[in-house]
Image: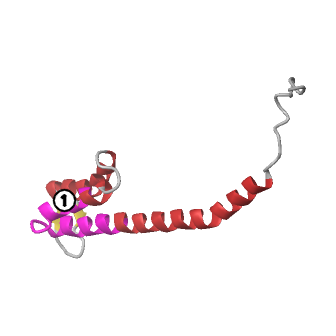
Amino acid sequence: MQRQAGGSEWAGGSSRTWAVLCHLAALAWWILPGLGHLLGPFVVWLIKRGDDDFVDAHGKEAINFQISATIYGLVLMVAAVVLLFPVGMELVGSTVGWREPWPPRLLTFL
């Protein structure tokens, strides 16, 4: 058994199961892409937050992690587009008028 977060009582099997489900509910992303990873832990936390302090603490942690990971991912995507788009456009612009050496031009008389 484990100690409850922020308390001196020990968490029972049911409490630990619901706490794990708070974290595993993020896999709802596979069912509802885009928001499932946020809604899954949020729904489990809303259902069980008043019943047990251990589940309440783990539900908050799961939601906090998912929100943080979403923000970090969005910032990295924007940074990648801002930094890599000009580089890609420069590469594409420098190849204008260049022809691939393969396949050889067999019908050069046309």
- Of residue 66 and residue 73, the one placed in the foreground of this image is 73
Q: Is residue 20 a member of the stretch shown in magenta?
A: no
| Above-or-below relation of 68 to 101 | below
- Quarter holding the C terminus is top right
The x, y position of residue 76, in whole percent, is 53, 65
For the point 83% across and 31% down, the residue is 102
Q: Tag count in the figure?
A: 1
For the point 35% across and 63% down, the residue is 66
Extreme front residue here?
110
Determine the main secondary structure of the stretch shown in magenta: helix
The x, y position of residue 72, in whole percent, is 46, 67
For the point 75% across and 56% down, the residue is 93
Disc 1 residue crowd, few under 14, some 14–19, many 20+, Cα 10 Å: some
Extreme left residue here?
51
For the point 19% across and 68% down, the residue is 56
Query: What kind of residue is marked 1?
Result: Val
- Quarter holding the N terminus is bottom left
Q: Is residue 48 a member of the stretch shown in magenta?
A: yes
Q: Is residue 100 left or right of residue 42?
A: right
Extreme right residue here?
109
The x, y position of residue 48, in whole percent, is 13, 62
Q: Is residue 49 left or right of residue 67?
A: left
- Of residue 7 and residue 82, the one placed in the foreground of this image is 82
Question: Which residue bears the numbered disc 1?
Answer: 43
| Above-or-below relation of 58 to 110 | below
The image quarter in which residue 19 lies:
bottom left
| Above-or-below relation of 66 to 20 | below
Q: Is residue 88 left or right of residue 95?
A: left
Magenta span covers which residues?
40-65
Give SS at disc 1.
helix
- Of residue 27 and residue 95, the one placed in the foreground of this image is 95
The image quarter in which residue 52 lies:
bottom left
